[in-house]
């Protein structure tokens, strides 16, 4: 009986921390035109650079350096045209070709979703180390 209550309370604490922005970083970029491979590659590089800069500043209690990364493409009215999560990954993914390739794949999905003029790519990153630090999980480990 005690264990389900503990899990419930831990889930509430976690949800509250994330809603308050603990460990969350966001950024947006103008969606490049599909017919311009150069601008598409520049956007991929800008996104990968942002992820690298974000993970460089995060806490890593007891080596917990995992991040959850997600992207969405919104039209000029703010409607989401497509979204994708890269899941929970280690920062090293964005220092290899895999990170850039995963961002490229999202960009292809976004172009197929048919963004109009003024569309944006929105990125969100959640640092699990920051959340663990805030909740005191690392001290309990």
Image (cartoon, rainbow, N blue to C red):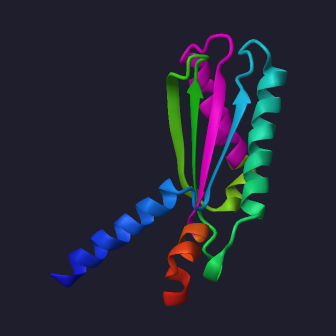
**Residue 89 at x, y = what percent?**
59, 58
**Residue drawn 55% across and 68% down?**
131
- State left or right for residue 8 relative to residue 47: left
Q: Quadrant of residue 71?
A: top right
User: Going by the picture, which residue comes out furthest to the bottom?
Assistant: 140
Q: Which residue of the protein is positioned furthest toward the front in this rendering?
A: 20
Quarter-of-image position of residue 74: top right
On screen, residue 51 above or below 120: below
Q: Is residue 33 visible?
A: yes
Q: Is residue 40 above or below residue 132?
A: above
Q: Position of residue 119 (x, y in %)?
A: 65, 19
Q: Which residues are magenta?
A: 99-128
Q: Is residue 84 left or right of residue 41?
A: left
Can residue 141 be seen in this snapshot? no
The image position of residue 109, as x and y in percent, is 57, 25
The residue that appears at 29% across and 78% down in the rendered structure is 6
Q: Is residue 62 above or below residue 12?
A: below
Q: Is residue 125 magenta?
A: yes
User: Quadrant of the rendered structure where residue 45 is?
Assistant: top right
**Which residue is more in the foreground, 104 or 33?**
33
Question: Quick one: 107 or 132, which is closer to the camera?
Answer: 132
Percent coordinates x, y for residue 107 in the rendering: 64, 28
């Amino acid at each position: 009986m005690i264990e389900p209550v503990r899990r419930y309370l831990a889930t509430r604490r976690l949800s509250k921390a994330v809603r308050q922005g603990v460990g969350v970083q966001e950024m947006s970029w103008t969606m490049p035109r599909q017919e311009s491979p150069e601008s598409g590659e520049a956007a991929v590089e800008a996104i990968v650079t942002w992820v690298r800069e974000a993970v460089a500043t995060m806490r890593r209690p007891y080596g917990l350096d995992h991040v959850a990364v997600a992207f969405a493409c919104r039209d000029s009215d703010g409607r989401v045209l497509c979204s994708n999560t890269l899941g929970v990954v280690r920062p090293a993914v964005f220092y290899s070709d895999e990170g850039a390739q995963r961002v490229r794949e999202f960009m292809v999905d976004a172009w197929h979703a048919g963004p109009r003029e003024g569309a944006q790519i929105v990125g969100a990153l959640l640092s699990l180390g920051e959340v663990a630090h805030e909740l005191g999980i690392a001290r309990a480990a």
